[in-house]
Image (cartoon, rainbow, N blue to C red):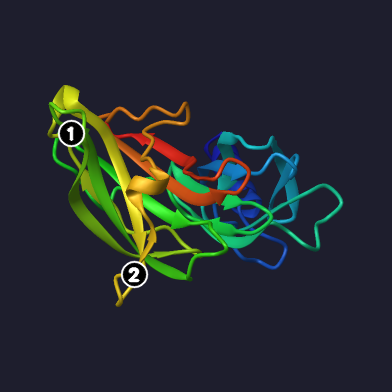
Amino acid sequence: MKSTFKHLHFFLFAGLLLAGCKKDGQLIEGKSYGVININSTTSTDIGDLLVDIDGKVVDTLKSPSAIKGIKAYKGDRKLKIYQPGKENTPVIDTVLHVEGKDTKLNFLYTADAKIIGGGYDGSVKPAKGNSLVQFVNLEKSLPASVDLKIYELYYNDNGDILAEEITTVKDIRKDKFSSYTELGPVKHGDYSYGYYFGVFEPGTGKNLVDVLTYYPTIYWDSQGSQSFQPNKVISLGFSYDPVNSFYVTPVIYETEIK
């Protein structure tokens, strides 16, 4: 009986060992999973986009939309996002390093711009009650790099509109989002119109977009609220609308800081 038990134990152990080996004798490495969250901002004419990970279509992005919880192996994953039938000319073609449950990919795609990034990466922690804003220049007529001054507009007892300069954000570019700028609640209370900005040429200081001519507004959500909202990160683009003769400033991404 003891001899039979030993033989049985040996065969079970040998079977488990063989099951854990490849045909070439190498041990099979266990693979663990992570989760990818994708947030896209695209123009309405782009349509649906296919999400391809390591050569396999795993989901579809409606324009514009977000996908949360795409399961993928951890490590470097080949990610392509493209319009149906246009696999050879993808909108996004990159390697995404997947770790844990919150690997993020944010991207902006229009007929004139393709930018990966934006959103909140956690690298800057604003004071409690303050918020962060970052910018990207989407206007063709402006230089590749511009400086941007943020103002609070308010009115006095006589009804005059005044502009108080709050801060300057340098090197706003067309190929990536700027660094974060921290803003707090407006100073002028009920007299305040909110935060606005002007655009200037780097070095010379030439005024390219005058704040009191075009009134480019910092919006705090995609519904167009001008009222300051605490504990947020907003990624804001700006471009000129020739039909209505003013600058449009769409919120590209918005995130709550918890």
Who comes first in sequence, dot 1 or dot 2? 1
Residue at the farthest right position: 85
Q: How far, Cα to Cα, is label 1 from label 2? A: 27 Å
Q: Amino acid at mark 2?
A: Lys
Mark 2 secondary-structure assignment: loop
Q: Is residue 76 visible to us here?
A: no
Q: Quadrant of the N terminus?
A: top right
Disc marking residue 144: none
Mark 1 and 2 residues: CB-CB less than 8 Å, in contact? no
User: How many marks on residues?
Assistant: 2
**234 or 101, which lies in front?**
234
What residue would you read off at disc 1? 186
Q: Position of residue 41 (x, y in %)?
A: 58, 43
Q: Amino acid at mark 1?
A: Val
The structure residue drawn at horizontal position 74% and vertical position 55%, both measured from the top left corner, is 55
Q: Position of residue 202 (x, y in %)?
A: 33, 73
What residue would you read off at disc 2? 206
Q: Position of residue 227 (x, y in %)?
A: 30, 27
Q: Position of residue 199 (x, y in %)?
A: 36, 59
